[in-house]
Image (cartoon, rainbow, N blue to C red):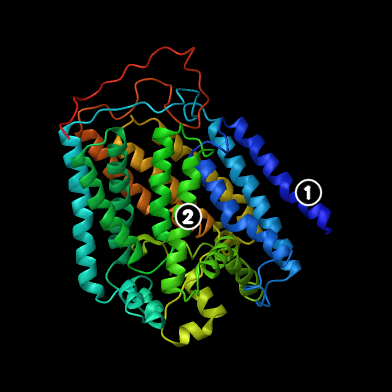
């Protein structure tokens, strides 16, 4: 394939995506779960295709599995999957009663009761208690190893805290990462609605615990997700959901500064320039590289047929195949030889291919697109309140993981189910309706027609004294 044809197809894919978004009443430059997911895929995988095709990533160019031929194969798979993912979004948006109809584009201020604030604080405290219980079991954290200068022990400590943790890690992670992030973002939303000293102190306490939870494994992405989550809440409430704002520059700078510190402390970067170079390379190519390993791994092995997907409680008749762990052991046996249980996650299309080959690349993204839009549409129907806004930002980050992790957890979405139940319970206990009474949704992805629509009646609880 000539370079001209490659570049033409590369940009044509995104022209088609823009058209699909318009047909679905969405816009790529306005915050919605679909627009955020496509932005994450572009950043973490699609740009990386350009880097590998033109051999612009020297620190990963030594991998013999990265060739021009394999790059073109992956380019074809990812382009196809993006279009089928987008078609899934469009198809679900055409279902009567699901589509996010045109409504009020701007954020509608809300009031909260004392009871709602109490529920948010109680939820955050429950998650912090879970974090303390977890720390009692793991002992030395990867963060302690890094801060004490034992950079070589970081991987071992991280392995013992996650992949090699035997105490029901998924339950701990659910509360000390996912639910705590929802609570923190909800308290941030509460603070943005009206700044008071009490609200500020409540938010800072939850944010401190969330930051520690994100950093304790010395991983880079969790803390970046915390920053991005606050950014999404901010633009939703203060910038009409637009990505084209100065706030974007501020939050991008914060992410780069955070990642630079991580690379200097935990990854041995020599200075800020070296750290920023590694950040860029890791961001645009790091999650794409394991896809090359998958292509080579399954040249001689049969496809998994769904066995890498979750098997809740062992109810299904198969033993779960830990794809990312097995792939890391195969590609980096030196890591496994040191007793480290590593992981090599890649874009969700990689797991789709590993299980069903080319068929999976066509079918699974369509199903994920349908499910992603359906969840977004249901969240848009919730009445505006702190927990709803925190839930919306968390859900965007949750689905944004499609850019860097497998598809299985989105087909059996345990985290989303539990978080949804918690959010709905808190909303049911608060003195306000759960769902909007009008068919018009207050959603930042919708086009404004406030001038022609009738005012929306809302039931607002008395203001809280905080």
For label 1, count other residues whose C-alpha is less than 10 Å away and answer few (under 14), some (14-19) or many (20+). few
The residue singled out by tag 1 in the image is 8
Q: Earlier in the sequence, mark 1 or mark 2?
A: 1
Q: Secondary structure at mark 1?
A: helix
The one nearer the camera, 251 or 112, is 251
Residue positioned most to the bottom:
337
> Would you place residue 198 above or below residue 25 in this image?
below
What distance separates the C-alpha of mark 1 from that of mark 2?
Answer: 28 Å
- Let me know if residue 363 appears in the view: yes
> Would you place residue 5 above or below residue 439 in this image?
below
Q: Where is residue 437 shown, x and y percent of the image?
A: 34, 21
Q: Where is residue 351 shown, x and y percent of the image?
A: 55, 62
The one nearer the camera, 237 or 156, is 237
The one nearer the camera, 299 or 156, is 156
The reply, left or right, for residue 280 in relation to residue 431 is: right
The answer to which image quadrant residue 360 occupies is bottom right
Q: Nearer the viewer, mark 1 or mark 2?
A: 1
Q: Residue at x 74, y 62 (%)?
A: 72
The residue singled out by tag 2 in the image is 401
- Let me know if residue 286 appears in the view: no
Q: Where is residue 86 shown, x and y percent of the image?
A: 60, 42
The reply, left or right, for residue 165 in relation to residue 262 is: left
């Amino acid at each position: 394939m000539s370079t001209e044809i490659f570049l033409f197809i590369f940009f044509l894919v995104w022209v088609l995506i823009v058209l699909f978004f318009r047909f679905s009443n969405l816009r790529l430059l306005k915050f919605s779960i679909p627009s955020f997911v496509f932005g994450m895929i572009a950043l973490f995988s699609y740009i990386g295709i350009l880097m590998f095709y033109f051999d612009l990533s020297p620190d990963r160019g030594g991998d013999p599995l990265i060739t021009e031929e394999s790059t073109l194969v992956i380019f074809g798979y990812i382009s196809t999957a993006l279009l089928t993912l987008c078609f899934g979004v469009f198809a679900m948006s055409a279902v009567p009663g699901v589509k996010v109809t045109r409504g009020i584009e701007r954020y509608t201020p809300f009031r909260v009761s004392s009871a709602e604030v109490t529920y948010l604080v109680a939820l955050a405290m429950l998650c912090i208690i879970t974090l303390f219980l977890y720390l009692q079991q793991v002992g030395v954290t990867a963060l302690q190893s890094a801060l004490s200068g034992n950079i070589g022990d970081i991987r071992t400590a991280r392995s013992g805290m996650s992949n090699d943790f035997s105490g029901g890690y998924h339950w701990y992670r659910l509360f000390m990462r996912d639910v705590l992030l929802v609570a923190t973002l909800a308290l941030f939303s509460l603070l943005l609605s009206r700044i008071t000293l009490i609200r500020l102190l409540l938010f800072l306490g939850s944010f401190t615990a969330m930051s520690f939870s994100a950093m304790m494994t010395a991983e880079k992405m969790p803390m970046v997700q915390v920053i991005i989550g606050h950014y999404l809440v901010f633009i939703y409430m203060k910038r009409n959901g637009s990505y084209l704002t100065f706030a974007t520059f501020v939050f991008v700078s914060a992410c780069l500064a955070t990642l630079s510190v991580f690379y200097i402390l935990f990854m041995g970067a020599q200075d800020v320039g070296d750290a920023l170079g590694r950040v860029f390379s890791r961001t645009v190519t790091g999650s794409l590289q394991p896809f090359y390993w998958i292509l080579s791994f399954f040249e001689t092995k049969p496809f998994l047929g769904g066995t890498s997907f979750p098997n809740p409680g062992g109810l299904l008749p198969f033993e779960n195949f830990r794809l990312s762990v097995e792939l890391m052991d195969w590609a980096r046996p030196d890591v496994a030889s040191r007793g480290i249980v590593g992981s090599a996650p890649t874009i969700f299309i990689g797991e789709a291919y590993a299980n069903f080959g080319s068929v999976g690349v066509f079918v699974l993204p369509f199903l994920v697109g349908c499910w992603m839009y359906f969840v977004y549409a249901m969240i848009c129907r919730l009445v505006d309140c702190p927990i709803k806004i925190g839930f919306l930002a968390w859900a965007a980050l949750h689905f944004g993981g499609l850019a860097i992790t497998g598809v299985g957890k989105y087909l059996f979405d345990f985290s989303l189910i539990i978080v949804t139940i918690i959010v709905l319970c808190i909303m049911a206990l608060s003195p306000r309706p759960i769902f909007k009474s009008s068919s018009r949704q207050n959603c930042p992805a919708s086009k404004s027609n406030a001038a022609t629509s009738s005012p929306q009646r809302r039931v607002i609880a008395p203001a809280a004294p905080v």
